[in-house]
Amino acid sequence: MRRLSGQGDPYWDDFINRPPNDVRNMITEIVAKAPEGNIFPTQSELHSPNVTARHAKELTLYLGGQLVGIADLGKQTPEIARGYPYAIVTGVRAEYDPYMSPGPGGQAAVQAGQFVTFIVASWIREMGFRATMKSDVPRAEREHLAVAAGLGKLNGDGKLTVPKYGTKIHIADIIFTDLPMEADG
Amino acid sequence: MAQTIEWMNSPEAKQQQAPPGPAAATVDERVLARRAREAKKAKATAVNEADRVSTDIGSPLVAPDGTPRTVPNLGRTVTMVGMVTNVDVNDGPHPKNIRGELGKAMNHWYTKTVAKDPLMRATDSSHAADKRNFLTTHTNATSKGVINPKKPDVIDPKALSKHIKKVAKHLGADLVGIAAANPAFMYASGSRYVQDGEANDTYQSMTPDALAKRFPFVIQTTVAWDHDTLQAHRHHIGDMSYHHTSMKNAMVMKALEGYIKEMGYTAIRGAVNPQGAGLAAGLGELGRNGMMISERFGSRIHMPDPILTDMPLIADGPIDLGVEDFCKICRKCANNCPTNSISFGPKVIYNGIQKYKINWLTCYKIRPYVADHYGSCLTCIAVCPFTKPDAWWRRVGGKILKTTPIKARPLVVRALKWIDDTFWGEFPSRRVKFMGYDTGLKVGEHNCTDPSCTANHKEPQKIIEGDVGFYAPIKKQTDAFVKRG
């Protein structure tokens, strides 16, 4: 995402902060409510888990993610793991905090994250493995998984900070999957 | 390192291709000679549907129904010189193919085949196993949101234009422009382009002329393709460069459409020709390869479905990058086109518009024959001298061409073309690796070239050396349906 200043723009504040009049005009709502496709019936021939993990990360970064890590859900509680062994955690730079800025501009980081995670989850399903992109995971849980995937640390306020972007990072929808991968620490 | 065709066929090159490596990408000398002769002729070749070029081109100042029209300024590369009959979007290649008008093989490939490659299945609409796994299925669905009844308190077209461009970039666009709507580049009445085929808006029965008056502005944006993966043209890696940006384009445009409605204005999709809007908005110029060529990204942009709106804006104008002067001399895309679909000759007048016209049918018809190896060829885009990384040296070259007086440009073009051929090759064929895909492998050969992979693959692992990619010698395939000169 670009650094664009709203200075001198009389419409910018509404773009960032005004909640939509009709949520169906929000691309983030359209994608969040999109039904998931089926899992391809034949599994693709896989590389070893370390290489598969690298390919998943390569695709995530190629599509526009700034950070990506893989969390081992075997070390998490069953409520967090949701029956999956791995979670792909993607971070996108957020100029505006999407939890504080409900306008279409404020949600731009969510949009950028959805673009990445939707395609990565679809790719895994098309390889014949289970993968689901969860939009309803609370912020605290997303950031907890981001720490588990080695993306950063929680600061004194309990917010995620990462080395390059500080707190200006949004953890996109988490992908829960059973694709055999090597998890990060 | 890029290599030329001459180098690839030299004894040194053949020696360097060690036995365990991929088979050499051979180029038929007779084809090269024939293409050189065709280039020398420099006149309309068999590709241009010349039989459809009418001698009486009519007046550009009237519509076929007699309605007076203004002539749009589309820059130096495209000129409206005669009467333009508005095109029905259902006469495009894909709708024709879906209706079975291009033959059984094409129809079967487009409507009934599922891609063998998982990445293709997730990023290519027509070959997905389940279309719900393809993002654009959802983002290009007809918008259900309503227009906000409350418009902004202050309506300043200058500030709104600046704002909407900033918004598009914030939402992910790389280029954005505003065109004055003109009926000449709008689709015929009742004809709308949308992904899910549910095109319905209350203005659908209006003629293009009435629509352009009611909605005076068109907003066009685009997202640039990744340069490095595009170098793997005629390969699934190159497909990824194209497909994922098309998906992003659709997402950005849908977000922008929703925001315009939230601001209280109408946003109509599927009514305007994307390239016409892009030219009038100054996003680029039209090249010999039939693609838009932009200042920063060259040919590696694809025009998405633009937004027609009644938001009060200020329109941009077309730009002059020197594409007109470059394409007249270069012909690199025509030389490299595997199906001879790109003309070596001058522009033609087609439907009242003077431009370089490709033979879309031969370009399109190759696809079922190569579907296991790639989806879209992209060679004309990858080899275009304008298609380079957005680096300082590329910007310097572009600025020199742009600022040179038109009469002196042929000299600059020849110099830039020589530099391009020398450093990037006459037939750029780089080896590209991406997510385990490798253009160094012979097409159709499955082999893991990652030394850190310990998986027990079905086929034995081989070491492939060298930095020249393998490019399918597709002459045999194209000879099945293309009559060469």
Image (tube, rainbow, N blue to C red):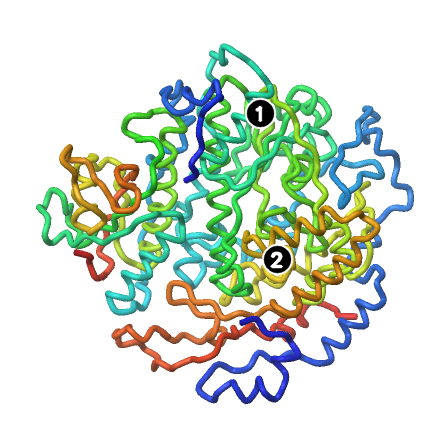
Q: Position of residue A107 (x, y in %)?
A: 36, 31
What type is the residue that disc 2 sits on?
Answer: Ile
Residue at disc 1, secondary structure: helix
Find residue B381 and name its label: 2
Q: Is residue B269 above or below residue A78?
A: above
Q: Is the residue marked by circle 2 packed among few (<14), some (14-19), or many (20+) residues within 10 Å?
A: many
Give the image location of residue A132, x and y in percent.
Answer: 27, 47
Q: Nearer the viewer, residue B175 or A124?
A: B175
Same chain letter for marks 2 and 1? yes
Instruction: For mark 2, give the secondary structure.
Output: helix
Callout 1: few (<14), some (14-19), or many (20+) C-alpha neighbours within 10 Å?
many
Callout 1 amino acid: Ser
Q: Are marks 2 and 1 in contact (CB under 8 Å)?
A: no
Give the percent coordinates (x, y) of residue B359. Answer: 72, 56
- Which residue is under mark 1? B161
Vertical comparison of A56 with B247: above or below = below
Q: Quadrant of residue B199?
A: top right
- Which tag, 2 or 1, sits closer to the chain's start? 1
Picture quadrant where residue A31 is located = top left
Q: Nearer the viewer, residue B361 or A89?
A: A89
Q: Is residue B171 left or right of residue A33?
A: right
Residue A16 found in image quarter: top left
Front one among B2 and B55? B2
Residue drawn at point x = 76 percent, y = 46 percent = B77
Tell me if residue B26 comes above or below residue B110 in the rendering: below
Q: Residue sitting at 49 percent across and 13 percent down? A: B152
